[in-house]
Image (spheres, rainbow, N blue to C red):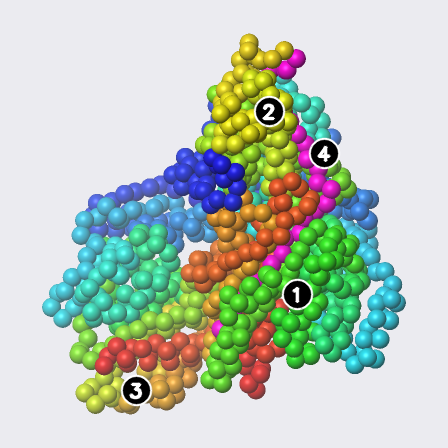
Amino acid sequence: MGISAMVGTPIKRREDPRLITGQATYVDDMKLLGMYHMAILRSPYGHARIVSINTDAAKALPGVIKIYTAEDLRGKVGNVVVAVPLGRIAEGMGIRGALAEGKVRFYGDPVAAVIADDAYTARDALDLIDIEYEPLPAAIDIEKAMQPGAALLYEEFGTNVAMSSHPPTDEMDKIFEQTVADGGIVVKQRIVNQRVAPVPMETRGVIAEYRKSDKSLTVWSSTQIPHLLRNFLAATLSLPQHQVRVITPEVGGGFGCKLNYYPEEMVAAFAAMQTGHPVKWIEDRSENLAVTVHGRDQLDYIEVAARKDGRVTGLKVHGISDMGAYCQLFTNVIMIAFGFPVSCGSYDIPVHLSFDVVFTNKAPTDAYRGAGRPEATYVSERAMDLVAFNLGLDPAEVRRINFVQPDQFPYKSSAGAVYDTGNYEPALDKALQIIDYKNLRAEQARKRAEGKLMGIGISSYIEICGFGPKGTAPVGLYESARVRVEHSGTVMVYTGASPHGQGEETTFAQIVAEEFSIPVENVMIMHGDTDSTPEGRGTYGSRTTAVGGAALFNAVQKLKEKMKLIASHILEASPSDVELEDGKFSVAGSPQKSVSFNDVALTANFSNTLAPGIEPGLETTVFFEPEACVFPFGTYVCSVEIDKETGETKVTRFVAVDDCGRQLNPMIVQGQIHGGIAQGIGQAMWEGVEYSEDGQLLTSTFMDYAMPIAEEFPQFELDHTVTLTTVNPLGVKGVGEAGTIGSTPAIAAAVADALGVAHVDMPFRAEKMWKIIHQQKG
Amino acid sequence: MSIPAPFDYHPVKTVDEAISLLQEYSDDAKILAGGHSLIPSMKLRLSQPGHLIDIRGIDGLSYIREEGDVIAVGAVTPYIQVLRSDLLKHHFVALTEAAEDLGDQQVRNRGTLGGSLAHSDPAGDMPAVVLALKADIVVQGPKGKRTVQADDFFVDTFLTALEPDEILTEIRFKIPPARTGTAYIKLENKASHYALTGCAAMVTLDTDGTCTAASVAITGASTKTTRAGTVEAELVGKKLDEATVAAAAQHAAEGLELVEDIHGSKAYRAQMTVVMARRAILQAAEHAS
């Protein structure tokens, strides 16, 4: 490895100095000449007919430039993009323009946009717009929304169900019958995965600028998908693709909710085109909690069959996905395309899947850290715990005997996914050893004897990420990298990925430094501007390193080969005899015959001494499309204690053993796991978006939406195993979402264990625990 | 967007200036001190005062000092000073405990004791502590100063005994007799971290451990911060052990108009009030000995 054994070292992130000293530029930091401000008037109702809109008073407010409603956009702005319109969605159900037309279908539904000289005027003008609504009954409870007689969001379709699949269960029924006949059990459970809000620290925001003279649109957006956003804008605003540029400034967190195409981006761009002035929109926190896509909101009915020894013989999952009122980008396929394929989790078991995907009068749901996989993992992990609970077996051992075995990889799961590599038992054993499982159970027994409620929970998760191979989405989810070695020996990298906190400015530089054998300081990673980066697909789904890093690695190899060729001429050797080590190209066996990396770079760029027939320059662009997804895994073990009097629950220990394949930077891996676990525990313990029966949002500020805070968590105890993937040359899987996926079920298991019950639905708030405890007493 | 409705801003240098502006603008004016309850409310436009009177520039409204048998605290004293005060900690550790856990660092740096009392949030920490410590609240208006007992000060949700043209200037705590202990314990709403229910308690014990005086105040459970009279009556004259305190605390939710919301049902609040009362009284008794 030599001069820079960079990959695998926990070097500090180069993103951090600018971030923690306030020198990063976020979209709200930007001021453009002549910039207008946009404010959005939103529905105060969960479901209502729009009777009339009167903007006269608002238009008369000094400083108001324009006010737009759906009428102004008709024929000029296309619909919000939906990636995979299936079922009734293909017929238009759930498809909408950027502003509500005829009806509002959720609290916060955007109805009108005010463009004004400044943000204050724009906000004041909202209060002067007069909208007459006819409130309608709302469909809030997902199961009630599916019943005949439910309030309908799209009356013309006669139902709130957009997509359904109920394949026959005969084969699985036979397995279940046989299992019971052989002395095994079948356990049924209703499982709620509640709606949560992603809550990035930076809310959404956009600035759109349009130059009428050459019809060019530039958009700065707090987004995870600059290239996709560019393409969506071009398509929906009928602009030629090459006339649209998207620039991603610093993004203060996305967690999936900024992997999307939003009405406000569309209207801001439209307003910029109409007025010829830049238009800025910054979301406030209440808007963010109300209308930025929510996560999860899935109801599952499961049945799991197991032999007396705990070996699961079959799993039935009926999933009901609550989409909210409209389709955003992946709303309708989060459950069935991303979650369902890994319904079997870490286990070698047959599964039967069925589903309903339903509209309700709530904000649209879409990707949120894990996007379908947390829900699927929650189901498979609860299933294992239900088996253990009902058979009186140790949940660790039930998992062990059901694991996919090392010799079964690549493993074709009955749920559809083909797992690349895995070795689940060592991770389980490591986690049990770190938490000292035997003694922890002994401690539990002692505490129980004292009348205390202590629980232990285990979760052995897998996840599917690194999207993705052909067919994953309507537009290929490859990644790209353009690499340029400059005359000074420094390296510029332009990636099509769009990191926003994941640390690839650091880890990608580590890859380049390692492969070129140069100091990591000599490498610069650029991203986010569609003008300068090759076509990419953005950062989400734990894909940036597995796909983007692989493209980068391949690009570097290409340039390395060319540099070896150039060096071979300088060294008068055969290219196949040239090695790169310690920043030098040398002849194998004759290390004194060498030329530095920098000298080769100079030779290539200042072409006068370059051997004839070799093209000057050192620049290449590579696209990488993986042939498969990758499957990180791990085991988490945690303990909780519940205060009998109040129901307050404390997480006392949390051990996480993760396997994300090769770790480029262990510190960054740990940071991802920490953040992921915090969000996973947050959902399990405290979080939850709530609506009233008529569709009012009850959790519209942090006074009511319980965000986890640092002092609520124990110190996380982290360790890892390494099982490389064969899918990409780096051997990396993904790690951004694993922490969230694995942690929620571990907490759920611990709480159920503490209470001595089979299952409790999240969130595990104090009053809920207290009720259960009191019902048990009485 | 989170932008307040337009307002006029009046920074003042004296209490009299503030009072005269209050007289002029009456219900259309709000006093600005810490602003950490007021400004969020204005940003959501739940509150739309046409006039903000900023009293932070008035000299001599922020202090903690001993005046004979009383500790006087200026209305504009920020929580951070309250929690750092050895004088207050020595006599009224409940005040310190409440200030330590209140809000977050930014709120503690800016929010003021007087502001908290004038705001009268039914889940506020300071109203409960001030009630249990039986403080006197000094207010000043065009007719001069008057003193309102804490028991009479908190009238209802966000409503106090302050007239529209009056401003709270001082809080006075009578230094309690020896062998007096105080405590404040709350069960937190996990979103706001306000009290779902909380209890502040002050008990005085005589030399053989018998309780000679008790004041217990409940916050968070009801529409206003309230003294739990029955609990107090059940403590006085008794030796405060686990059993007597538990028995007395059973009455903690009596007479309360219990609040119900997504954070807690009436039944839960009622029972938790009992639990918090028991815990706070026991802790106060421990501090007394």
The chain holding disc 4 is A
Query: Label 2, label 1: how many angstroms apart (C-alpha)?
Result: 51 Å
The residue tagged 3 is B240
User: Would you call the spot at circle 2 few (<14 residues within 10 Å), some (14-19), or many (20 or more)?
Assistant: many
Q: Is residue B282 left or right of residue A569?
A: left
The residue tagged 4 is A78
Along the line of sight, the residue nearer the viewer: A411 or A739: A411
The residue tagged 1 is A381
Foreground tag (2 vs 4): 2
Amino acid type of the residue that numbered disc 4 sits on in the rendered structure: Gly
Question: Does the image show residue A129?
Answer: no
Q: Which stretch did the figure color magenta?
A: A613-641
Q: Indicate whether B203 appears above or below B21.
A: below
Q: Earlier in the sequence, mark 2 or mark 4?
A: 4
**Cβ–Cβ under 8 Å for marks 3 and 1:** no
Which type of secondary structure does the marked residue at label 1 adopt? helix
**Cβ–Cβ under 8 Å for marks 2 and 3:** no
Which type of secondary structure does the marked residue at label 4 adopt? loop
> Which mark is on residue A699?
none
Which type of secondary structure does the marked residue at label 3 adopt? loop
Amino acid type of the residue that numbered disc 3 sits on in the rendered structure: Leu
Query: Label 2, label 4: how many angstroms apart (C-alpha)?
Result: 51 Å
